[in-house]
Image (cartoon, coloured by chain):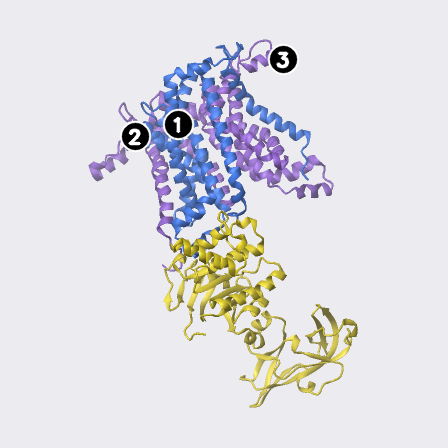
Amino acid sequence: MQGTQQRDWVTRAAILVPYLWLVAFFLLPFLIVLKISLSQTTIAQPPYTPLLDVSTGWDGLKAFFAALSPENYATLSSDSLYLWSYLKSLQIAALSTAILLLVAYPVAYALARAPRRWQGVLVLSVVLPFWTSFLIRVYAWVNILQHDGLLNQALIALHLVDAPVTWLATDTAVYIGIVYSYFPFMVLPLFAALEKMDNTLLEAAADLGSPPWRTFLQVTVPLSLPGIVAGTLLCFIPIVGEFVIPDLLGSSSTAMIGQTLWLEFFGNRDWPVASALAVVLLAILVPPILLYRRREARIR
Amino acid sequence: MKRFGTVNLTALALGLAFLYLPIAILVINSFNDSRLVTVWAGASLRWYRELLRDEAMLDAASVSLRVAVLSATAATVLGTLAALALTQRFRGKLLFSGMIYAPLVMPEVITGLSLLLLFVAVEIDRGFWTIVIAHTTLTLCFVAVVVQSRLVTFDRSLHEAAADLGCPPLRTFLTITLPLIWPAVASGWMLAFALSLDDLVVASFVTGPGATTLPLRIYSEVRLGVKPEINAVCTIMIAVVALGLIAASLLTKRSAGSAQLGGRA
Amino acid sequence: MAARPIVAFEDVTKRFGDFTAVDRLTLEIFAREFFALLGPSGCGKTTLLRLLAGFEQPDTGRVVLEGEDLAGVPPYRRSVNMMFQSYALFPHMTVAGNVAFGLKQDALPKAEIAARVDEMLGLVQLRPFAGRKPDQLSGGQRQRVALARSLAKHPKVLLLDEPLAALDRKLREETRFELKELQRRLETTFVIVTHDQDEAMTVADRIAVMNGGRLAQVGKPVDVYERPNSRWVAGFLGEVNLIEGHISEVYPSFVTFESESLRLRLPHADVAPGAAAFALRPEKIRISHQMPEAAAENGAAGVITDIGYLGTVSYYKVKLDSGRVLKAALMNEQRQSARPIHVKDRVWLSWAPDAGVLLSD
C-alpha cells in the first residue's frame, strides 16, 4: 500500500530476529510458568502433571485443560507462611529503597556539583564496584560481618561494645547488603537528573530571597523527581525478589519471597507451588513495572 | 556557578569509602597468610597458589568465561538489532518494548524459573548451552538499552543522506551507523559480559551436569564457610574487571573525539 | 526549457495522520530550471521535496521523473540527489571521503572517483581541505562540502533543502549568487526549498508559492511579484497595500474601482463588477507636496504619520483623508537632512495606472 513505510528486508529482519528470540525465551516461558502453577506435583521427571501431549489431539487438549486446577493458589492463600513471605519482602524492599534514597542522594548531589573535569572519573569510580561480581560484594560483607570479622573488631577497639555482636543471619545484615549492592542503581538515575538541572533556577531562587536549605527542598528535590522515581523503581522491583543477599547474609527466618521460592523449588521439589509463587510475585510487581515502562516510554 | 563545598566532598568521600572498603578488605585478606581474617600473618601468595591447584575452581572459571564470551556476543548482536527495531514503528511494538524493558527490573528468580521450565517442557538437556541461552536472553535487554540511548541522539539525516547517495540499507548500517555507534555497542558487549560472568540465580536454575559456573562454585563454597581461597578468586576477578574497564574507557576516549561532534543531532 | 517536464507531480497527496501536508498537488518542473518552492512553515514544500527524493511515498497521485513513475523506487535508486539543511556530513569520513561516498556506491574505478572528487572540490574551492574532517570546518565550508557531495554523481535533479538557512546574512547573499552561477554552468535542474523570499526571487527562474499543502501561484519571480493572483500571495511576497472595495464599471478601455473616497481609473482587466481588492506595492507610490496631474484618477491625499528609515529605503505611513492608511516606500537617494518630507506633512500620493493589480480572491 502506497503511503505507508515500505520496509526493506534488512529492517524487517532486524525487527523479526530479536522479536522471535524474546517471544521464544521470554514470553513463552512465562506462559509455561502460568501453566505449571495450575498443575499438580508428582514424583516424576518432570515433577508435575498434566503434561501437554499434542499427539493425543483434541481429546488430549481437553484433558489437559480439565486437569488444570487452581489448587496451588489455594495452598498459597491458606498457608500464612507464604503471605508472610510476600509481606516481608515488600517491607524489606520498601525500607531498603528508602534507605538507599537517603544515602545515595547526597552522593549523587555531590557528583552533580563536582567540577566537570572530575565528573567522569568520579562517576566511573562509583560505578566500578558494580562491574565487579555481585556475589563478591555480598561475600565481602559476609567477611566483615562475621563473628570475628572487621566490624566487630572495630567496634570492640572503639569500646562501643564489650563482646562481638551477631550481625550475620539478621535482618540488619540483609539491609546492609541490599543497600550496598543496589547503591549504583539509585545513584546513577539521581545523578542523571541532578546533573541536568538548570543552575540558573537555583540562582533565581537565591535572588528572590530563598535560603539554601529551602531552595534545596523546594527547588532541587522536586526538580530531581524523575530521577527519584526512576531510582526507586529500579531498586524496589528487583529487591522484592532478591535471593542471594538474604540467603548469604540473612537466615531462613528472613523469609523473603525469593528464598521461599528457591526452597519450594530446590528443597521441596514442588515446582507447581514455586510457579504459583512466581506468578503471584509477578502480579504484585506488574503495577510498578508498568509504571517504570510508562516512564521510559514518555522519555523516549 | 557550581560550588563544591566541604559538605559535598564529605558525602562523596563517605560514599566512596562505603563502596570500596569491603572490596579493599577482601583484596587485603587474599594476601593474608593466616586462615583467619582476624589475624594478619604476613603477606603471602599462599591462597593464589592453592587456587591454581583447585581444579574445580579453575574449571568453573573456564566455563564462566566461555559462557560469558558467547552470550555477550550473541546478546550484543540481538540487542543491537533490538535497539534498531525500537527506532522503527511497527505493529506489536508495545509488546516488543515491554519484553525489552521488563527483564531489566524483573527479579532473577522469576526469569530463572521460567527459563528452566521452558527447557524442561521442550526437553532440552540442561548444561552449558542452556546457560548461554539464558544469559543471552537476560543480557540482550541491557545491550538494547545502552545502544538505544545512543541511537536516540543519532542524526537521522545521515541515513537519509546515505540513501540519497545510492547506499542500500544494509550497507548504510555497516558503513555509516555501526562506525558511529560502536562505542555504545562495545560497552553493551562489556556490560553483557560482566553480567554473564556475575550471574548466580539464573545459572542455578538452568545449569546441568558439568556446567558449573564460577559464581555457582563460589556460592557453594561460601555456604560452607569463609574460605581464604575465595578472597583470591575475588581479587583476581576484580583486577580483571578493573583492567578491562580502564582499557575500555581509554579506548572510548580516543574515539569519542571524532564521534563527539558528528552523529549527534 | 524543454517542452516535456523533467519532474512532474500529478495530483499528489501526502498525509501524516490527520494532517494533510500536500493536497492534490500538480506541478511541472522543466530541465535546466532553477525552481524554487517558497512558502511559510508547514506549507508542504519540504514534504514535496522529500517525495521527490524518495523519503516519503505519496498517498495518492504520482511522482514522475523523466517520464518514469517513481512509485516504489527507493531513494538509493533515484538519480536525484539532495543537499540537506543540516548538511548531514558523515563525521567519521574526511571531506574527500564524503564527496566520494556516492561514487563508491556505483562501484566506479578508483581513479575515476579520485578525479571526480578533485573536480567537485575544485568547483566549490575546497581542494586544500580534502583531508580534513567535518568537525574541523566552518559552517560555510561544511555547506560547500555538502554541495559538492550532492553534485558528485551528476544527478538529473539536485534538491536543496533550505541550503543557506544556517549561514549568516553576508555569506548567504554571496552564496546565493554562487549557487545561481553554478546552476547555470552545470545546466542541472535545481529545486530549492526556502522560506526566504529574497532568496527565491534572486536565484529562481520560476517560483511555486505554496500555502497549506496547495499551490498558490507558479511563475517567474517578476510575474508572481508584480501580478499576484490572490490577496494571500500579494501579502506573502513583500509589502503590499490591499485596498478593499468594488469594481463599479467595466469598459473595453478601462475599469473603475471604488473604495470609500477613492475612485480609481485602471486599465482594462478581465474582471466583472463586484467586490474586489486593489493590491498596490509601496514602492510604486510617489509622494509629492503638490497635487500631480494624474492624481485625480490614480492618487490620494493624506498626512504623513510615521517614517521608518531602513538605510536604503524609507517607509512612509500616510493617513488618507478617508482614514485609511497606505504605506509608501522611497529610495533614500538624498541624505536625510535634504529630504523634504516630514511627519505631519500634507502630501499627495500617486501611482501609474498599471502599477497595481485587481484581485478577486
Chain of the residue where label 2 is placed in the rendered structure: B
Q: Secondary structure at mark 1?
A: helix
Q: Nearer the viewer, mark 2 or mark 1?
A: 1
| Visible residue check, residue A281 | yes
State the image coordinates of residue A134 (x, y, percent, origin top left).
47, 26
Between A211 and B257, the residue placed more toward the observer is: B257
Three-letter amino acid code of the residue under disc 1: Leu
Q: Which residue is mark 1?
A: B65
Three-letter amino acid code of the residue under disc 3: Leu
| Dots 1, 3 in contact, CB < 8 A | no
The chain that appears blue in the image is B
Three-letter amino acid code of the residue under disc 2: Val
Badge 1, how many Cα within 10 Å: few under 14, some, many 20+?
Answer: some
Farthest residue to the bottom: give it.
C252
Chain of the residue where label 1 is placed in the rendered structure: B
Q: Nearer the viewer, mark 1 or mark 3?
A: 1
Q: Is residue C289 above or below residue A46?
A: below
Quarter that holds the N terminus of chain C: bottom left
Q: Secondary structure at mark 2?
A: helix
State the image coordinates of residue A263 (x, y, percent, origin top left).
39, 22
**Left or right, A155 with reference to C218:** right
Q: Is residue A4 above or below residue B236?
A: below
The chain that appears yellow in the image is C
| Visible residue check, residue B227 | no
